[in-house]
Image: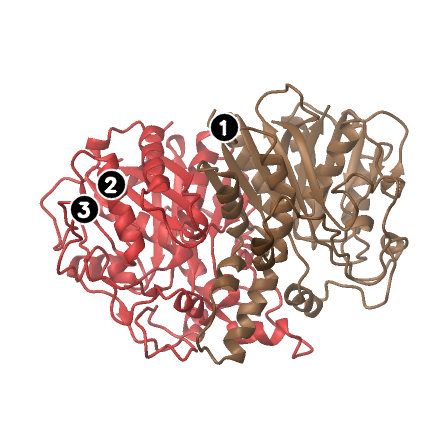
Chain colours: A brown, B red
Amino acid sequence: MYILRTSCISPQKTHDGSYVQETVSYTGNKYNAIEPDYKGLIRPAQLRRMGKSIRMGIGAGLPLLKTIEKVDGIILASSEGGLEDCIKFLNQIENYNEGALTPTNFVQSTPNALAGSLALMGGCKAYNMTHVHRGLAFENALLDAILLFEEHKAETLLLGNVEEISEYNFNIETLAGQFKEEETSSHNLLSSQTPGTVCGEGSSMFLLSDKPDNAIAELTDVAQICFPSKEDMIKHINTFLDKNALKPDDIDTIVIGKNGDSKTDFWYDYVCDTLFDSQNKYYFKNLVGEYATSMAFGVFLASEILDGREVPEETVIRKSGVARNILIYNHYKGQQHGMVLLRK
Amino acid sequence: MNIFVTGLGCISPLGFNLDENLTQLRAGKDGLVRSEYLESSYKNKKFFGEVKKDTASLLKQISVTDKKGLTRTDALAFIAFKEATEQAQLQKEEIESVETAFISASTVGGMCLTDELYRDANLKTYTSDYAESYNCSAHTLRIIKEYNIKGITNTINTACSSSANAIMLGMKLIKTGRVKRAIVGGVDCLAKYTVNGFNALQILSDSKCSPFDTGRDGLNLGEGAAYLVLESEELCIDKPKYARVLGAGNTNDAFHTSSMSDTADGVIACIQEALSDGGVRADKIDYINAHGTGTQNNDQVELTGFKAVFNTIPLFSSTKSYTGHTLGAAGALEAIYSILGIMHNEVYPSLRVKEAIPGFDTQPVANLISDKEINTVLSNSYGFGGNCTSLLFARP
């Protein structure tokens, strides 16, 4: 499966590419997306009604759809969907005591609303899917696409993720102990050595093809495991590499999802120390924060690297050679672990 | 490659297990009631397909190591999952194997706890047992952890077609050799959140729903869970096989966020794709388990689709007239009812149809049929966002 083009809205200026020269720093627990001007893409009346997740997803996805005559499917990953709309509708229910409510928030709150809206705005009547498996939703979306190509049911696909910060998930995740109690900055987040991380959001979209022509990278395979033991994890990575006729040494670059949470970052150190101790090494959550489908940003960053583009120096931990074979390893809350293989 | 259904498990408004569901289907007895357990002011104003047990009793029924934070959704999922895997005679190590995938679906997730969610989301508390319980995948993760599942796992939310897509994806994973076995299905619970959502859309009927009746005036919401065990032929040579999964179609109507196009574009393309994926001619379909929600829009559009695809529209009915619309569980529950039809050569009727919808020269099955061979069945599911999925099952 080949990546033809990418598009990304994130807490960095990825939408116009200027994030490489100028990184935005954050303090506190919310890394809010920097959104583009949607004028010309979304009609103002439509834009006013759109929740943030739909807006970002359309903003990242629709321009890609416009670069191609047709796609054979739209595949989305989102753990939470339109949270802002969800809480608005929830508050309507409580505040008006289940009275006469307007359905707009309800309809927009369902996680499949974005894939539906993209199909509607892009006129795509083909395959349409939304994966919501929390920390592995994006990995499952990738697998879905791989299967469609393998079955020759598609030649091109639009695939992506969306996640938004809303009061709803932020408060609930705060109760779940997900965020830092002290204030950190994006400069010291990953070295903080305290419990909790920070909350990010965004949408990364990929135009995929079954043919290598004009591709910027090949995404060869994806793997996943839930609630592994340490031994399970190493075995699982080795099996995954083996299945793709690779050894750990064949991987020249590793992109990892370290997020500064002392409760779960040990997984990254353990995997890197055991299998990948000399590879080129990149982080990304110091730039975009943590969210369940953050693997999507990892794939965006890896695509940029393989395409030979510059990436922000804040992401580079170790760089000694050219990247040809990249493994991205990411987990969510130490429970759901995903791996993606990309090559030039 | 042949893929067989070797296990079925369900809990629904019709009963707590597969047998109880079958008995009610045969008897033509619906499970639609004024709600006993829903915490909503609509509980006595609308009809609901409610599972007839309170949450505490449902939770008591399941054997789970740590019950903290479990919801009604989780309880239903655990109950149906257990029945399906036991019926398929799956051993512990088979469920744990990386050759086994688990794909579930839900649209409501733990939002059945609407009041707790309101409290937690607005930070009106300092601690909550439920912070990890609201997500659509919460039940999937609880089952994964409890059963130590190490293979591919997933949760789908394409609104009302969610668990039909879970079945399709399980089939594809086996077909492409990624796994040899997939446990697939979905779950949803009645929730103040969805009741108010569908009510705001003005598509909830005040009476018991009557899909495909010309006087139909909306749907009833329901709840339940349903799981199927799919296995590749090599794994189930000596096992009872209940049906064969032939193929699936997935399209988008790309017309409107919460209603379907008059021309039934998504419906037509979806059925055609399922037929072509399964290598089945349209005239081979013996019965269609329709999406048939009972809204003006859905039933009219679905019939338009049938008319376009079939020279003679096959026998069809909507078992939502028994259960109400169980949302994320509907696709899997109706797949199970379709398979029961194949197993017993039966068609379960659409209840309460007084007058067929004009213009189609056809009417849904109104009484139990048990004297006809049912070899191949089409099961349809359509959701908000234009999502359409059709599944094909056949005699093993």
The residue identified by callout 2 is B306
Give coordinates of residue A248: x percent, y percent: 76, 29
Give coordinates of residue B368: x percent, y percent: 13, 53
The residue identified by callout 3 is B344
The residue tagged with tag 3: helix, strand or loop? helix
Mark 3 near mark 1, Cβ–Cβ under 8 Å?
no
* N-terminal-most mark, 3 or 2: 2
Asked if residue A221 is positioned above or below residue A285 in the image, the reply reads above
Query: Mark 3 vs mark 1: same chain?
Result: no
The residue tagged with tag 1: helix, strand or loop? loop
Asked if residue A289 is positioned above or below residue B241 in the image, the reply reads below
Of the pair A62 and A278, the residue shown nearer to us: A62
The residue tagged with tag 2: helix, strand or loop? helix
Residue found 48% across the figure and 38% down from its top: A123
Residue found 58% across the figure and 58% down from its top: A82
Residue found 90% across the figure and 29% down from its top: A320
Mark 1 near mark 2, Cβ–Cβ under 8 Å?
no
Q: Which mark is residue A317?
A: none
Front disc: 3 or 2: 2
The residue identified by callout 1 is A154
Q: Is residue B241 left or right of residue A122?
A: left
In this orientation, does residue A157 appear?
A: yes
In this orientation, does residue B67 appear?
A: no
Q: Amino acid at mark 2?
A: Phe
Q: Amino acid at mark 3?
A: His
Of the pair B115 and A54, the residue shown nearer to us: A54
Report, in whole angstroms, how far the alpha carbon at label 3 lies from the one at label 2. 25 Å
Query: Mark 1 vs mark 2: same chain?
Result: no
Report, in whole angstroms, how far the alpha carbon at label 3 lies from the one at label 1. 38 Å
